[in-house]
Amino acid sequence: MHIRTIFTAISLLAFGAADSRAADISVTFGKSNEGSLPTANASCVAADGKAAAGKNRSPALSWSKGPAGTRSYALAMTDPDVPADLSLLNRDDTEIARDLPRMEFTHWILADIPASVTRLAEGADGDGMPQGGLPLERTEHGRRGQNGFAAFLKDGPHGGYMGACPPWNDLRIHRYRVTVYALDTDRLTLPDAFTRADFLAAAKDHIVSSGAAELTYTINAKATK
């Protein structure tokens, strides 16, 4: 997949709304929630003022156990800082101002994570960038949904993790937020190819607790928060 295609894809389509329940679950990236997303977890890295393909490994995650009655977990990773005006992306003749309108993009969605699982190793749900993403299947660590690329690219199922790749001309440092949900059901009723929007609709009456953590990432040396 060409880098420019990745940039355009990452900037499209926001799904769902933030969960309003109390954040009772403690979520941790790797060993820390401080600083930047490791470059190994990004799908692009800085290169000569622009970008090159990254390793795209799903991040190491852990979370505290949900309350009594928790029968499964789910997680979603989103970027709420994607520029809304796609015509500005990765252009040599312009910079994307920090205060321009933004939208949300889904990088990762897993449902039906067994209640016994409260930790995912780095690379557990993505390591590299296979054409079309990973299969939409049930794994030992949960059922894969479609990341945001599935809404408009037709070259595969786009399951599994797709890492950070903010536009190289964006002056805003992007945030990458993982939300973990504790659910009162083993399995949700979801379509074969489900999105984050499908998950949020199906999980609405089953979420008993949630929590989130975020790191930042940019490939623009001039970007600020």
Image: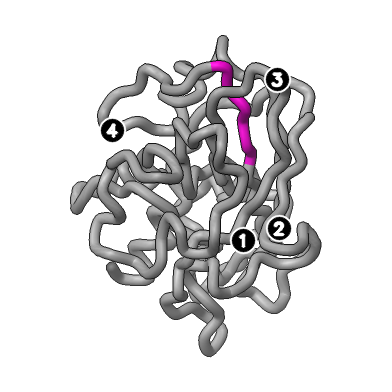
Three-letter residue code for mark 4: Ala
Q: Name the residue under label 3.
A: 68
Spot occupied by residue 182 in the image (x, y as percentages of width and height): 62, 27
Three-letter residue code for mark 2: Leu
* Label 4 crowd bin: few (<14), some (14–19), many (20+), radius 10 Å: some
Q: Is mark 4 on a helix, strand or loop?
A: loop
Give the number of the mark in front: 3 or 1.
3
Q: Say whether disc 1 or disc 2 marks the residue closer to the N-terminus.
A: 1
Between marks 1 and 2, how big is the CA–CA gap?
Answer: 21 Å
Spot occupied by residue 220 in the image (x, y as percentages of width and height): 64, 74
Q: Relative to residue 183, is residue 87 drawn left or right?
A: left
Q: Is mark 3 on a helix, strand or loop?
A: loop
Q: What element carries label 2?
A: strand
Three-letter residue code for mark 1: Ile
Q: Say whether disc 3 or disc 4 marks the residue closer to the N-terminus.
A: 3
Q: Name the residue under label 2.
A: 215
Q: Quadrant of residue 143?
A: top left
Q: Mark 4 points at which residue?
A: 193
Q: Say whether disc 4 or disc 1 marks the residue closer to the N-terminus.
A: 1
Q: Is the magenta stretch mostly helix, strand or loop?
A: strand
Seen at 26% across and 48% down, the residue is 135
Give the number of the mark in front: 3 or 4.
3
Q: Mark 1 points at which residue?
A: 96
Q: Say whether disc 3 or disc 1 marks the residue closer to the N-terminus.
A: 3
Give the number of the mark in front: 2 or 3.
3
Label 4 near label 3: C-beta < 8 Å? no
User: Start and end of the magenta stretch?
Assistant: 179-184
| Residue sitting at the far left | 155
Q: Relative to residue 170, is residue 35 drawn left or right?
A: right
Three-letter residue code for mark 3: Ala
Between marks 3 and 4, how big is the CA–CA gap?
Answer: 30 Å
